[in-house]
């Protein structure tokens, strides 16, 4: 099997797991260090996991034979041996639990046959090759999917770089360029687009920072924070480490340690950028408020999801809570790594990686060949060396081994030359059969994979064509879609009535993908006249269209949408209910309190979690009791979100319930309860927080110390 031999593959997987596990331990030991230090450790761990298999092949092997593997047995007779008259060798069929053996038998006088003992090894190789091919194909499909997503993101970035205009006349551009020079970034482009509303950075050699079209109307503090955060990504070369993480995921997508490492790398990357913003003079509470507002009002559109494999968005809701707590904690070290420390850490890591990669914990044992003595008498019995039993591979059109009668091998001439010729002919026949079976398996698997890829590509082309059709309507009907910066300063743009009419008509299309894409385009227009089409789409037969309509109504900030969204909270589709609950949280209208309170009892945990978050956004005192009840939810994520919302409300009635939550079985819930008590600042929480200083989780203890400092 060459390089795909089982011990080598297992050795590579084990070494990658050892490297990632050691990286996790080192990062845990550095929990009191800066986020930049932990980010460097996780980056080196992923690079080491990728480099370990290659180094294992390149470096001299250091054998530590913890495991010994036996080679397949080979039994053969000496060249030129002529069995005597009256004796011959016969082959018995292979059983299902042990390897074949050769035994004697009787045949008519004058028959003879040489021993063909390499057939069992051929059968074992065929079975192993089949499973290896299947597993290799499965791995290749997973790796291809992740790499394709990354390459698609890179292609989309290249397309946006060519299509997106560079900002040259924005009032904030001079300050942004000054900040870039202050961070030591010689060249960076600032671009804007209507496709996505989330600030993001991309590019390794030609870095670019994407600013939303409405950024000209932002407060100066928000603009400075956004620009600093994205410039921090550029300065730290985070786009490069992001691509390395994607490649590591593609290589080890079946290994949970790889996904854990990538998730921690992403978390530490964002916290390191937050630290740079804070070190630049931004106050922690101000930064936390702006970050929360950005995450609330700015959600990446559909196209930026394609960019996720190659870009860095500013605010992911899944990381928001941890980032806020780190930003508000004054004890967190904010300093970055110097080049000297980074180089020293990299050197130490490389020195540790070399012995791990070079060690070979397995060794092959050579099996003694049993040859017939060069005498006039052939051996009566020749047995194969015993080896561990292996399960039989399924073979169609073949009866069970026990049912097959014993059959003597064909008789051969006595001459040694004839023996060699027959052996060569049989070996060639078996090799041809092996190649035929191997090619058949490979072609069969390839044909299945090809059909699946073809169907996926066809579906992607169809969806792209539909989106392109609607996009062309917008481009031709709105000649000023790429308008000047002066238009972007206005809080609500006025779209061409022809565009609204065309897209509204597309909402009646029979294809739900067309309706969904048209609705997405309408939401991006943010024109007051699209309110009625959104109301109509909220009753569409397609759940995806209703979900998009609920999102659009939340973006409109129109109080008239409260009642329809309250009705959508009772939708049969859980995703629609979740989006409706989120939209009510964005509207922040107290009229939605009752519906959100009911959503806390929804059968879907994601809906309940989103309802708790929305109640925290509205900040109405009537939400306190329902959120206290949600602290007893069966799902830890719901309890955690309820504790966070109670911290937003800052009502003293929640103190007792939050103190009880300090004993929750989930560490994240306890940590969030501690943070909420620190926000409420009620002296009744002192005893509970003091007890939390002895919690088994270090993060809970750290937050408890911070919360006690908040209570005066």
Image (tube, helix red, strand yellow):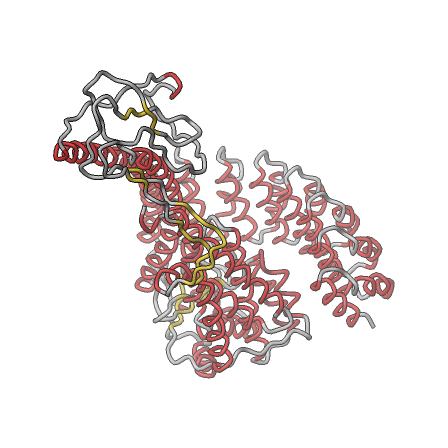
In the picture, measured across the screen, residue 327 lies left or right of residue 276, that is right
Quadrant in which the N terminus is drawn: top left
Which of the 4 image quadrants contains residue 709?
A: bottom right
In the picture, measured across the screen, residue 599 lies left or right of residue 178, that is right
Where residue 353 sits in the image (x, y, percent)?
Answer: 46, 67
In the picture, measured across the screen, residue 251 lies left or right of residue 580, that is left
Query: Relative to the observer, which residue lies in front, 498 or 61?
Result: 61
Query: Relative to the observer, which residue lies in front, 545 or 279?
Result: 279
Please tell me which residue is depicted at 26% across the width and 20% down the height of the picture.
408
Where residue 17 sits in the image (x, y, percent)?
Answer: 50, 56
Quadrant in which the C terminus is drawn: bottom right
Please tell me which residue is depicted at 79% across the width and 54% down the height of the picture.
663
Which of the 4 image quadrants contains residue 318?
A: bottom right
Query: Relative to the observer, which residue lies in front, 489 or 91?
Result: 91
Residue sitting at the far front: 376
Number of dots carrying numbers: 0
Where residue 10 sits in the image (x, y, percent)?
Answer: 44, 50
Q: Is residue 339 visible?
A: yes
Q: Is residue 508 above or below residue 304?
A: above
Q: Is residue 494 above or below residue 331?
A: above
Where residue 126 sits in the image (x, y, percent)?
Answer: 32, 36
Q: Is residue 213 visible?
A: no
In the picture, measured across the screen, residue 426 lies left or right of residue 269, that is left
Which of the 4 image quadrants contains residue 451?
A: top left
Query: Relative to the observer, which residue lies in front, 4 or 488?
Result: 4
């Amino acid at each position: 099997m060459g390089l795909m031999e089982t011990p080598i593959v297992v050795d590579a997987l084990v070494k990658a797991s050892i490297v990632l596990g050691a990286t996790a331990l080192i990062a845990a030991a550095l929990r009191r260090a800066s986020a930049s230090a932990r980010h460097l450790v996780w980056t080196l761990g992923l690079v080491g996991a990728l480099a370990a298999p290659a180094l294992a092949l390149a470096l001299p092997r250091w054998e530590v034979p913890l495991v010994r593997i036996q080679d397949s047995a080979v039994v053969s007779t000496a060249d030129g041996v002529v069995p005597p008259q009256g004796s011959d060798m016969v082959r018995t069929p292979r059983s299902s639990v042990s390897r074949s053996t050769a035994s004697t038998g009787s045949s008519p006088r004058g028959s003879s046959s040489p021993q063909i003992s390499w057939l069992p090894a051929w059968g074992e190789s065929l079975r192993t090759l089949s499973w290896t091919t299947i597993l290799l194909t499965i791995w290749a499909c997973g790796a291809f999917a992740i790499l394709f997503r990354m390459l698609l993101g890179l292609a989309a970035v290249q397309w946006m770089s060519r299509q997106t205009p560079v900002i040259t006349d924005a009032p904030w551009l001079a300050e942004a360029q000054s900040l870039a020079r202050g961070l030591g970034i010689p060249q960076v482009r600032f671009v804007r687009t209507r496709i996505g509303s989330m600030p993001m950075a991309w590019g390794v050699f030609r870095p670019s920072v994407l600013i939303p079209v409405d950024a000209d109307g932002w407060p100066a503090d928000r603009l400075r924070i956004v620009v600093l955060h994205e410039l921090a990504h550029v300065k730290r070369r985070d786009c490069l480490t992001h691509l390395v993480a994607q490649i590591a995921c593609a290589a080890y997508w079946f290994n949970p340690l790889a996904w854990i490492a990538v998730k921690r790398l992403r978390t530490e990357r964002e916290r390191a950028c937050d630290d740079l913003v804070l070190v630049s003079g931004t106050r922690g509470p101000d930064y936390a408020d702006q970050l929360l507002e950005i995450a609330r009002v700015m959600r990446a559109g559909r196209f930026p999801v394609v960019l996720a494999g190659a870009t860095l968005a500013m605010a992911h809701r899944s990381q928001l809570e941890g980032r806020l707590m780190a930003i508000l904690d004054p004890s967190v070290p904010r300093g970055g790594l110097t080049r000297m420390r980074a180089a020293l850490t990299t050197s130490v890591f490389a020195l540790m990686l070399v012995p791990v990669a070079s060690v070979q914990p397995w060794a092959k044992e050579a099996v003694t060949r049993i040859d017939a003595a060069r005498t006039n008498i052939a051996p009566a019995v020749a047995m194969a060396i015993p080896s561990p039993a292996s399960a039989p591979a399924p073979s169609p059109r073949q009866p069970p081994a026990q049912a097959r009668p014993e059959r003597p091998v064909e008789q051969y001439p006595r001459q040694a030359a004839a023996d060699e010729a027959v052996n060569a002919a049989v070996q060639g026949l078996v090799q041809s059969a092996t190649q035929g079976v191997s090619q058949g398996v490979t072609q069969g698997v390839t044909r299945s994979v090809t059909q699946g890829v073809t169907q996926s590509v066809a579906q992607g082309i169809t969806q792209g064509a539909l989106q392109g059709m609607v996009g062309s309507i917008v481009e031709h009907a709105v000649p000023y879609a790429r308008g000047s910066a002066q238009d972007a300063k206005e809080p609500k743009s006025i779209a061409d009535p022809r565009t609204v009419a065309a897209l509204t008509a597309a909402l009646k299309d029979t294809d739900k993908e067309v309706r969904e894409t048209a609705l997405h385009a309408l939401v991006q227009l943010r024109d007051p006249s699209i309110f009625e089409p959104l109301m109509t789409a909220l009753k569409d037969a397609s759940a995806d269209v209703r979900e998009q309509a609920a999102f659009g109504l939340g973006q409109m900030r129109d109080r008239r949408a409260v009642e329809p969204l309250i009705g959508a909270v009772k939708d049969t589709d859980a995703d629609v209910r979740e989006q409706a609950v989120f939209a009510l949280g964005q509207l922040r209208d107290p009229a939605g309190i009752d519906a959100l309170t009911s959503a806390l009892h929804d059968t879907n945990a994601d809906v309940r979690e989103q309802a708790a978050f929305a109640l925290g956004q509205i900040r109405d005192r009537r939400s306190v009791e329902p959120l206290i009840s949600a602290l007893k939810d069966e799902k830890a994520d719901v309890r955690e979100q309820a504790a966070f919302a109670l911290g937003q409300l800052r009502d003293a009635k929640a103190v007792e319930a939050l103190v009880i939550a300090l004993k929750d079985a989930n560490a994240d819930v306890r940590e969030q309860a501690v943070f909420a008590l620190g926000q409420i600042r009620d002296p009744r929480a002192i005893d509970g927080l003091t007890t939390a200083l002895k919690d088994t989780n270090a993060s809970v203890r750290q937050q408890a110390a911070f919360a006690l400092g908040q209570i005066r």
